[in-house]
Amino acid sequence: MKKEKTLLWKIGLIVISWVAFVALDFFFHAGLFSKIFTRNNPALLGARELFYRIPFGYLSFLIFIVIIYWLLSKLKIQTWKEGFWFGIKLGSLLSLTSILGLYSILTLDFDMLVVWGLVQAIELGMIGGMIGAANSGVSLGRLAIVVVALFVVSVVLTITLQAVGLAPQIGNLNN
């Protein structure tokens, strides 16, 4: 019988997972797919208001991670692979319902919604894999090292994409 994880361990895993989620999300939205998300669309807020509301998006990531942790624990998923595929499937289903709902009421471009959904599925897959790995005994310290590396790589790649013109540079937030 496995020993019950402490509250501090659970909080540590959730925080580490949240930092990983933020890092990957930064790369996708400010780097790789930023041209899609920075198009002028009347359904989106201006850059300044979007910037001010970033904490609400990051809070939603934290809630996703708590849900995935709870589900993986209840389902006794104990490997990174099982956790990853659970996260991909859950992320895909949640994204699909959101995409269909948003497409029915907003003027967002369909490709923007599809990319948003794919990104969310990938992010939830990563989180599921991390939680599954932790549940199988991978130490939080080892996961933290991987997350720090992910964070650095995400920032460097995003800055590089912006510097070479493949992604719009974060600039003036006057609109």
Image (cartoon, helix red, strand yellow):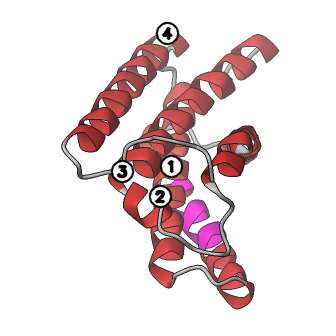
Q: Is residue 7 left or right of residue 78?
A: right
- Circle 1: residue type: Glu
Q: Quadrant of the C terminus?
A: bottom right
Which of the marked residues, 1 or 4, is nearer the chain's N terminus?
A: 1
Q: Disc number at residue 168?
A: 3
Query: Is residue 3 something one can see in this rendering?
Result: no
Camera-near label (4 vs 2) is: 2
Q: Disc number at residue 18?
A: none
Q: Classify mark 2: helix, strand or loop.
A: helix
Q: Residue 86: give x, y in percent of width and height.
A: 55, 56
Q: CA distance from mark 2 to mark 3?
A: 18 Å
Camera-near label (1 vs 4) is: 1
Q: Which residue is mark 2?
A: 119
Which of the marked residues, 3 or 4, is nearer the chain's N terminus?
A: 4
The stretch drawn in magenta includes residue 37: no
- Circle 3: residue type: Pro
